[in-house]
Image (cartoon, rainbow, N blue to C red):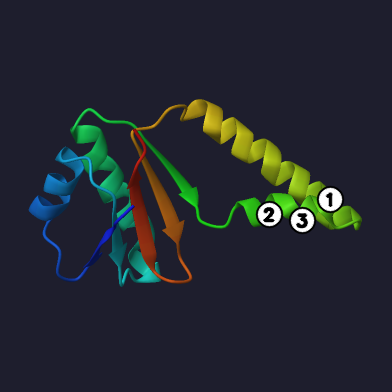
Amino acid sequence: MDYGVYSVKSVADSKIKSLIRDHKSFVIEDIDRTNFSEAVSHIEKMIEDEGLRCRVYTKGRAAAVAAAAIPVAPTVIGGWAAGIGIAAHNLVTFNPDYEIAKNMIMGTLTIEYKK
């Protein structure tokens, strides 16, 4: 799938709303860590304002579950706990129109249309 990439510093809300209305997948980059939660909430609200559902998750979360395979008590327990949390979250946000993947290390949000 082809993703448009937009800087948070220069993309207008009207452009984001247009992408959502057109069911496009896209990436928002250059997000400062101090504004990350605000950016996620803003995108989530725009999606929900269009009558669509979304799921927000942290990119790379499957790595936490993979830690359960390392035979050391803290990683096994942590991996299982992460797996249970992810499963519960997926049930609550079943069948979303959009998924928002947070990547705080890279300062990006990947907004992917799923249907």
- What SS does tag 2 mark? helix
In terms of depth relative to the viewer, which is nearer, 105 or 21?
21
> Where, by quadrant of the figure, is residue 39 drawn?
bottom left
Q: Is residue 24 above or below residue 110?
A: above
* Residue at image mark 3: 67
Amino acid type of disc 1? Val
Quadrant of image for the C terminus = top left
Q: Which residue is mark 1?
A: 76
- Left or right: 11 as drawn, with respect to 44: left
Element marked by disc 1? helix
Circles 1 and 2: CB atoms closer than 8 Å: no
> What whole-number distance in Å separates the C-alpha atoms at marks 2 and 3?
5 Å
Q: Earlier in the sequence, mark 3 or mark 1?
A: 3
Along the viewing direction, whichever of 64 and 1 lies nearer the viewer: 1
Badge 3 amino acid = Ala
x, y percent for residue 20: 20, 43
Q: Residue furthest front?
A: 1
On residue 64, which mark appears? 2
Relative to 20, does residue 103 appear above or below in the rendering? below
Q: Percent x, y for residue 112?
A: 35, 47
Is 107 placed left or right of 9 in the picture? Answer: right
Instruction: Kindly state the secondary structure of the residue where label 3 is placed.
Output: helix
Looking at the image, which is closer to me, 39 or 83?
Answer: 83
Q: Are marks 2 and 3 in contact (CB under 8 Å)?
A: yes
Image location of residue 49, percent across then percent down? 19, 34
For label 2, the crowd category at 10 Å Cα-Cα, with few meaning under 14, some 14 to 19 and many 20 or more, is: some
